[in-house]
Amino acid sequence: MRRLLLVVAALAVALGVSAVAIGAHGDARDGLQPRVAATEAGRAHHFDLRRVATGFNRPSWVGSAPGDLDALWVLEQPGRLIRVQGGRRRTQLDLTDRVLVGAERGFLGVAFHPDFATNGRLFVHWSDKRGDTRVGEFRNGKLVRELLHVDQPEENHNGGQLIFGPDARLYLGLGDGGGAFDPDEHAQDPRSKLGKLLSVDVDAPRPDWRVELIGLRNPWRFAFDPALGEVWIGDVGQDDVEEVNRVLLEPDEPPKNLGWDAFEGDWPTEGDDFALDRTGDLVWPVATYTHRAGCSVTGGYVYHGTALESLKGRYLYGDFCSGAVWSLAGTPEGAAEDVRRERAQVQQLTHIGPDAAGEPVFASATGTVYRAVPARR
Protein backbone atom coordinates (compact mmCIF):
# COMPACT_ATOMS: atom_id res chain seq x y z
CA MET A 1 0.00 0.00 0.00
CA ARG A 2 2.81 2.44 0.89
CA ARG A 3 4.56 1.96 -2.44
CA LEU A 4 1.22 2.37 -4.21
CA LEU A 5 0.58 5.70 -2.49
CA LEU A 6 3.98 6.98 -3.56
CA VAL A 7 3.37 5.93 -7.15
CA VAL A 8 -0.08 7.59 -7.16
CA ALA A 9 1.35 10.82 -5.74
CA ALA A 10 4.18 10.86 -8.28
CA LEU A 11 1.77 10.30 -11.18
CA ALA A 12 -0.50 13.06 -9.89
CA VAL A 13 2.37 15.52 -9.84
CA ALA A 14 3.48 14.50 -13.33
CA LEU A 15 -0.05 15.04 -14.63
CA GLY A 16 -0.44 18.37 -12.83
CA VAL A 17 -3.32 17.32 -10.60
CA SER A 18 -3.72 17.09 -6.83
CA ALA A 19 -3.08 13.73 -5.18
CA VAL A 20 -5.75 12.05 -3.09
CA ALA A 21 -4.44 9.49 -0.63
CA ILE A 22 -5.34 7.64 2.53
CA GLY A 23 -3.49 8.87 5.62
CA ALA A 24 -2.15 6.85 8.54
CA HIS A 25 -5.30 7.63 10.52
CA GLY A 26 -7.45 6.27 7.73
CA ASP A 27 -8.79 9.67 6.63
CA ALA A 28 -8.83 10.79 2.98
CA ARG A 29 -7.05 14.04 2.21
CA ASP A 30 -7.37 16.11 -0.92
CA GLY A 31 -7.38 19.69 -2.11
CA LEU A 32 -3.68 20.30 -1.56
CA GLN A 33 -2.26 23.03 -3.72
CA PRO A 34 -0.33 22.27 -6.91
CA ARG A 35 3.29 21.76 -6.01
CA VAL A 36 4.49 24.02 -8.80
CA ALA A 37 2.35 27.12 -8.45
CA ALA A 38 2.96 28.78 -11.83
CA THR A 39 5.04 28.56 -14.96
CA GLU A 40 7.89 30.98 -15.58
CA ALA A 41 5.67 32.89 -17.99
CA GLY A 42 2.85 33.03 -15.46
CA ARG A 43 4.60 34.86 -12.64
CA ALA A 44 2.41 37.47 -10.97
CA HIS A 45 3.73 41.03 -10.83
CA HIS A 46 2.21 42.46 -7.64
CA PHE A 47 5.26 44.13 -6.13
CA ASP A 48 8.88 44.99 -6.84
CA LEU A 49 11.91 44.77 -4.58
CA ARG A 50 14.03 47.73 -3.54
CA ARG A 51 17.45 47.16 -2.01
CA VAL A 52 17.61 48.72 1.45
CA ALA A 53 21.12 47.83 2.56
CA THR A 54 23.93 45.43 1.71
CA GLY A 55 27.25 44.24 3.08
CA PHE A 56 25.89 42.17 5.97
CA ASN A 57 27.48 38.90 7.04
CA ARG A 58 24.92 36.15 6.28
CA PRO A 59 21.79 37.99 7.45
CA SER A 60 19.11 35.52 8.53
CA TRP A 61 16.38 37.81 9.89
CA VAL A 62 15.22 41.38 9.37
CA GLY A 63 12.43 43.23 11.15
CA SER A 64 11.56 45.96 13.58
CA ALA A 65 11.56 46.51 17.33
CA PRO A 66 8.49 47.75 19.23
CA GLY A 67 8.61 51.52 19.56
CA ASP A 68 11.45 51.89 17.03
CA LEU A 69 9.44 52.84 13.97
CA ASP A 70 12.18 54.34 11.81
CA ALA A 71 14.76 51.54 11.91
CA LEU A 72 15.27 47.98 10.74
CA TRP A 73 17.07 45.40 12.84
CA VAL A 74 19.17 42.77 11.09
CA LEU A 75 20.40 39.49 12.57
CA GLU A 76 23.69 38.11 11.24
CA GLN A 77 24.12 34.35 11.64
CA PRO A 78 27.74 34.63 12.90
CA GLY A 79 26.51 36.47 15.99
CA ARG A 80 25.54 40.12 15.64
CA LEU A 81 22.25 42.04 15.87
CA ILE A 82 22.49 45.35 14.02
CA ARG A 83 20.18 48.37 14.05
CA VAL A 84 19.95 50.11 10.67
CA GLN A 85 18.54 53.61 10.28
CA GLY A 86 19.16 55.37 7.02
CA GLY A 87 22.87 55.02 6.31
CA ARG A 88 23.81 54.41 9.94
CA ARG A 89 24.42 51.00 11.51
CA ARG A 90 25.02 50.13 15.12
CA THR A 91 25.65 46.70 16.65
CA GLN A 92 23.12 46.27 19.46
CA LEU A 93 24.15 42.76 20.52
CA ASP A 94 27.34 40.84 19.79
CA LEU A 95 27.39 37.10 20.53
CA THR A 96 30.32 36.18 18.30
CA ASP A 97 32.27 34.90 21.31
CA ARG A 98 29.36 32.60 22.29
CA VAL A 99 28.20 31.30 18.90
CA LEU A 100 29.35 28.27 16.95
CA VAL A 101 28.92 29.00 13.25
CA GLY A 102 28.80 26.42 10.50
CA ALA A 103 26.26 24.33 8.60
CA GLU A 104 22.93 25.42 10.10
CA ARG A 105 24.34 26.63 13.41
CA GLY A 106 24.80 30.20 14.58
CA PHE A 107 22.75 33.14 15.84
CA LEU A 108 19.36 31.87 14.65
CA GLY A 109 16.51 33.88 16.15
CA VAL A 110 15.59 37.05 18.00
CA ALA A 111 12.37 38.25 19.63
CA PHE A 112 11.62 41.60 21.22
CA HIS A 113 9.42 41.66 24.29
CA PRO A 114 6.08 43.34 23.46
CA ASP A 115 7.07 46.10 25.91
CA PHE A 116 10.63 46.33 24.60
CA ALA A 117 10.34 50.10 24.13
CA THR A 118 10.11 50.53 27.93
CA ASN A 119 11.76 47.42 29.41
CA GLY A 120 14.51 46.64 26.84
CA ARG A 121 13.97 42.86 27.17
CA LEU A 122 15.45 40.91 24.24
CA PHE A 123 15.27 37.14 23.71
CA VAL A 124 17.67 35.28 21.45
CA HIS A 125 18.24 31.76 20.11
CA TRP A 126 21.78 30.63 19.29
CA SER A 127 24.06 27.61 18.94
CA ASP A 128 26.61 27.54 21.74
CA LYS A 129 30.26 26.57 21.27
CA ARG A 130 29.32 22.88 21.50
CA GLY A 131 26.60 23.32 18.89
CA ASP A 132 23.73 22.96 21.38
CA THR A 133 20.59 25.10 21.41
CA ARG A 134 20.46 28.00 23.85
CA VAL A 135 17.70 30.54 24.46
CA GLY A 136 18.38 33.45 26.74
CA GLU A 137 17.14 36.87 27.82
CA PHE A 138 19.40 39.87 27.30
CA ARG A 139 19.21 43.45 28.51
CA ASN A 140 21.63 46.21 27.57
CA GLY A 141 23.74 43.68 25.68
CA LYS A 142 24.22 41.33 28.65
CA LEU A 143 22.77 37.90 29.40
CA VAL A 144 20.26 38.17 32.23
CA ARG A 145 19.17 34.53 32.37
CA GLU A 146 19.12 31.38 30.32
CA LEU A 147 15.70 29.96 29.48
CA LEU A 148 16.56 26.80 27.55
CA HIS A 149 19.43 24.42 26.80
CA VAL A 150 18.85 21.49 24.43
CA ASP A 151 21.55 19.06 23.32
CA GLN A 152 21.87 18.88 19.54
CA PRO A 153 23.07 15.51 18.21
CA GLU A 154 23.94 16.83 14.72
CA GLU A 155 24.96 20.11 13.11
CA ASN A 156 21.78 20.61 11.10
CA HIS A 157 18.02 20.95 11.69
CA ASN A 158 18.41 23.46 14.51
CA GLY A 159 15.21 25.34 13.70
CA GLY A 160 15.50 29.07 14.16
CA GLN A 161 12.49 31.31 14.64
CA LEU A 162 11.81 32.91 18.01
CA ILE A 163 8.68 35.06 18.29
CA PHE A 164 6.05 36.26 20.75
CA GLY A 165 2.59 34.94 20.00
CA PRO A 166 -0.76 36.72 20.38
CA ASP A 167 -1.02 35.14 23.84
CA ALA A 168 2.23 36.92 24.89
CA ARG A 169 4.06 33.59 25.21
CA LEU A 170 7.48 33.19 23.60
CA TYR A 171 7.50 30.58 20.80
CA LEU A 172 10.48 28.62 19.46
CA GLY A 173 10.71 26.21 16.53
CA LEU A 174 13.24 23.38 16.90
CA GLY A 175 14.26 20.86 14.26
CA ASP A 176 14.46 17.11 14.77
CA GLY A 177 18.14 17.06 15.73
CA GLY A 178 19.51 16.33 12.26
CA GLY A 179 20.47 13.26 10.30
CA ALA A 180 18.43 11.78 7.49
CA PHE A 181 14.83 10.82 8.29
CA ASP A 182 15.13 11.62 12.01
CA PRO A 183 17.11 8.49 12.96
CA ASP A 184 16.40 8.86 16.68
CA GLU A 185 12.67 9.55 16.16
CA HIS A 186 12.77 12.83 18.08
CA ALA A 187 9.96 14.51 16.13
CA GLN A 188 7.39 11.86 17.12
CA ASP A 189 8.60 11.54 20.71
CA PRO A 190 6.44 13.82 22.90
CA ARG A 191 9.12 13.69 25.61
CA SER A 192 11.75 15.27 23.35
CA LYS A 193 11.94 19.00 22.67
CA LEU A 194 13.42 18.33 19.22
CA GLY A 195 11.11 18.43 16.21
CA LYS A 196 8.62 20.59 18.09
CA LEU A 197 7.03 24.00 18.33
CA LEU A 198 7.56 25.09 21.94
CA SER A 199 6.31 28.02 24.02
CA VAL A 200 7.03 29.55 27.40
CA ASP A 201 5.67 32.28 29.66
CA VAL A 202 8.73 34.48 30.13
CA ASP A 203 7.11 36.26 33.09
CA ALA A 204 6.48 33.09 35.09
CA PRO A 205 8.59 32.70 38.27
CA ARG A 206 9.93 29.40 36.92
CA PRO A 207 9.44 29.36 33.13
CA ASP A 208 8.47 25.93 31.84
CA TRP A 209 8.47 25.16 28.11
CA ARG A 210 5.29 23.65 26.72
CA VAL A 211 5.04 21.50 23.59
CA GLU A 212 2.56 23.11 21.18
CA LEU A 213 3.08 20.96 18.05
CA ILE A 214 4.99 17.77 17.30
CA GLY A 215 6.19 16.14 14.08
CA LEU A 216 8.33 18.93 12.60
CA ARG A 217 11.53 18.41 10.64
CA ASN A 218 13.09 21.88 10.57
CA PRO A 219 10.75 24.85 11.14
CA TRP A 220 13.26 27.50 10.07
CA ARG A 221 10.72 30.34 9.96
CA PHE A 222 7.13 30.68 11.19
CA ALA A 223 4.74 33.51 12.04
CA PHE A 224 1.39 34.13 13.69
CA ASP A 225 -1.52 35.71 11.89
CA PRO A 226 -2.77 38.12 14.57
CA ALA A 227 -6.14 38.42 12.84
CA LEU A 228 -6.98 34.74 13.46
CA GLY A 229 -4.43 33.61 16.04
CA GLU A 230 -3.14 30.89 13.71
CA VAL A 231 0.49 29.95 13.20
CA TRP A 232 1.92 29.52 9.68
CA ILE A 233 5.02 27.34 9.47
CA GLY A 234 7.44 26.66 6.65
CA ASP A 235 8.85 23.23 7.47
CA VAL A 236 11.94 22.26 5.45
CA GLY A 237 11.69 18.90 3.69
CA GLN A 238 14.06 15.97 3.23
CA ASP A 239 14.47 14.73 -0.35
CA ASP A 240 11.26 15.58 -2.19
CA VAL A 241 8.70 17.92 -0.62
CA GLU A 242 8.66 21.35 1.04
CA GLU A 243 5.57 22.25 3.04
CA VAL A 244 3.56 25.11 4.51
CA ASN A 245 1.38 24.41 7.52
CA ARG A 246 -1.47 26.49 8.90
CA VAL A 247 -2.48 25.53 12.44
CA LEU A 248 -4.80 26.88 15.09
CA LEU A 249 -3.15 26.04 18.40
CA GLU A 250 -5.44 24.61 21.07
CA PRO A 251 -3.59 24.45 24.42
CA ASP A 252 -6.44 22.52 26.05
CA GLU A 253 -6.03 19.67 23.53
CA PRO A 254 -3.07 17.30 22.98
CA PRO A 255 -0.44 18.86 20.69
CA LYS A 256 -1.30 18.44 17.03
CA ASN A 257 1.02 16.40 14.84
CA LEU A 258 2.49 17.68 11.54
CA GLY A 259 3.50 14.15 10.55
CA TRP A 260 7.29 14.07 10.20
CA ASP A 261 8.95 11.64 9.85
CA ALA A 262 6.11 9.32 8.88
CA PHE A 263 5.26 11.88 6.19
CA GLU A 264 7.34 14.33 4.19
CA GLY A 265 4.79 16.98 3.36
CA ASP A 266 1.80 14.90 2.27
CA TRP A 267 3.93 11.99 1.02
CA PRO A 268 4.40 8.90 3.23
CA THR A 269 8.04 8.03 3.88
CA GLU A 270 9.09 4.47 3.22
CA GLY A 271 8.72 2.26 6.30
CA ASP A 272 8.12 4.96 8.93
CA ASP A 273 4.39 5.18 9.62
CA PHE A 274 4.68 2.78 12.57
CA ALA A 275 6.42 5.62 14.47
CA LEU A 276 3.54 8.10 14.14
CA ASP A 277 2.35 9.37 17.53
CA ARG A 278 -1.45 9.22 17.52
CA THR A 279 -2.16 11.28 20.63
CA GLY A 280 -3.07 14.53 18.86
CA ASP A 281 -4.76 15.34 15.57
CA LEU A 282 -2.72 14.77 12.42
CA VAL A 283 -2.53 18.01 10.41
CA TRP A 284 -1.78 18.05 6.68
CA PRO A 285 0.06 20.91 5.00
CA VAL A 286 -2.05 23.51 3.19
CA ALA A 287 0.56 23.92 0.42
CA THR A 288 3.54 21.93 -0.83
CA TYR A 289 6.06 21.99 -3.66
CA THR A 290 8.61 19.50 -4.85
CA HIS A 291 12.35 19.96 -5.28
CA ARG A 292 11.80 20.78 -8.91
CA ALA A 293 10.82 24.26 -7.66
CA GLY A 294 13.36 24.66 -4.83
CA CYS A 295 14.93 22.77 -1.95
CA SER A 296 14.40 24.64 1.35
CA VAL A 297 11.23 26.55 2.21
CA THR A 298 11.53 29.92 3.94
CA GLY A 299 8.32 30.59 5.82
CA GLY A 300 6.94 34.12 5.72
CA TYR A 301 3.89 35.87 7.14
CA VAL A 302 0.30 36.91 6.41
CA TYR A 303 0.28 40.42 4.97
CA HIS A 304 -1.91 43.02 6.69
CA GLY A 305 -0.14 46.14 5.46
CA THR A 306 -1.63 48.96 3.39
CA ALA A 307 0.83 49.66 0.54
CA LEU A 308 0.28 46.47 -1.49
CA GLU A 309 -3.42 46.04 -2.10
CA SER A 310 -3.03 42.83 -4.12
CA LEU A 311 -1.36 41.07 -1.15
CA LYS A 312 -4.04 41.88 1.43
CA GLY A 313 -4.59 38.87 3.67
CA ARG A 314 -2.24 36.66 1.65
CA TYR A 315 0.56 34.52 3.05
CA LEU A 316 4.02 35.19 1.58
CA TYR A 317 6.73 32.52 1.52
CA GLY A 318 9.71 31.50 -0.60
CA ASP A 319 12.61 29.13 -1.17
CA PHE A 320 16.26 29.54 -0.15
CA CYS A 321 17.71 27.64 -3.11
CA SER A 322 15.67 28.86 -6.07
CA GLY A 323 14.90 32.32 -4.69
CA ALA A 324 11.26 31.85 -5.68
CA VAL A 325 8.59 33.82 -3.82
CA TRP A 326 4.97 32.68 -3.66
CA SER A 327 1.79 33.99 -2.08
CA LEU A 328 -1.44 32.18 -1.32
CA ALA A 329 -4.86 32.95 0.10
CA GLY A 330 -6.17 31.27 3.22
CA THR A 331 -9.73 29.97 3.15
CA PRO A 332 -12.27 30.37 5.99
CA GLU A 333 -12.15 26.60 6.49
CA GLY A 334 -8.45 26.71 7.43
CA ALA A 335 -7.07 25.56 4.08
CA ALA A 336 -5.42 27.54 1.27
CA GLU A 337 -6.08 28.39 -2.37
CA ASP A 338 -4.83 30.55 -5.24
CA VAL A 339 -1.12 29.81 -4.91
CA ARG A 340 0.72 32.15 -7.23
CA ARG A 341 4.37 32.55 -8.11
CA GLU A 342 5.36 36.19 -7.69
CA ARG A 343 7.77 37.82 -10.13
CA ALA A 344 10.03 38.98 -7.28
CA GLN A 345 12.99 36.70 -6.60
CA VAL A 346 15.56 36.70 -3.78
CA GLN A 347 18.59 34.44 -4.04
CA GLN A 348 19.48 32.64 -0.78
CA LEU A 349 16.28 33.85 0.83
CA THR A 350 16.52 33.46 4.61
CA HIS A 351 13.63 35.55 5.92
CA ILE A 352 10.39 37.31 4.95
CA GLY A 353 8.72 39.42 7.60
CA PRO A 354 7.01 42.75 8.33
CA ASP A 355 8.63 46.07 9.10
CA ALA A 356 7.11 48.42 11.66
CA ALA A 357 4.33 49.35 9.20
CA GLY A 358 3.58 45.72 8.32
CA GLU A 359 5.24 45.98 4.90
CA PRO A 360 7.37 43.04 3.64
CA VAL A 361 11.13 43.02 4.10
CA PHE A 362 13.41 40.24 2.88
CA ALA A 363 16.85 39.01 3.99
CA SER A 364 19.32 37.24 1.71
CA ALA A 365 22.32 35.28 2.94
CA THR A 366 24.28 36.99 0.19
CA GLY A 367 24.35 40.04 2.49
CA THR A 368 21.44 42.14 1.22
CA VAL A 369 18.16 43.33 2.72
CA TYR A 370 15.22 44.24 0.46
CA ARG A 371 11.86 45.94 0.87
CA ALA A 372 8.70 45.24 -1.16
CA VAL A 373 7.33 48.29 -2.97
CA PRO A 374 4.34 48.74 -5.32
CA ALA A 375 4.96 47.28 -8.76
CA ARG A 376 5.89 49.64 -11.55
CA ARG A 377 3.59 49.00 -14.51
Image (cartoon, grey):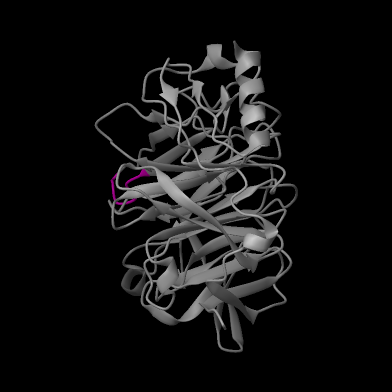
Find residue 157 and report its horizontal and vertical position in percent: 64, 39
Q: Is residue 242 magenta?
A: no
Q: Is residue 201 magenta?
A: yes
User: Farthest residue in the left direction?
Assistant: 252
| Type of secondary structure dominating the magenta stretch | loop
Location of residue 256 with respect to 231 vertically, above or below: above
Quarter residue 207 falls in: top left
Q: Which residue is drawn at 34% across and 53% down?
A: 165
Quarter residue 121 falls in: bottom left
Find residue 283 and report its horizontal and vertical position in percent: 42, 31
Find residue 296 and report its horizontal and vertical position in percent: 66, 47
Residue closest to the eye, 290 or 114 = 290
Q: Count the labels in the image.
A: 0
Can you say which quadrant of the picture contains the N terminus? top right
Quarter residue 112 falls in: bottom left
Q: Residue at x 68, y 72 (%)?
A: 368
Q: What stretch is highlighted in magenta?
A: 200-205
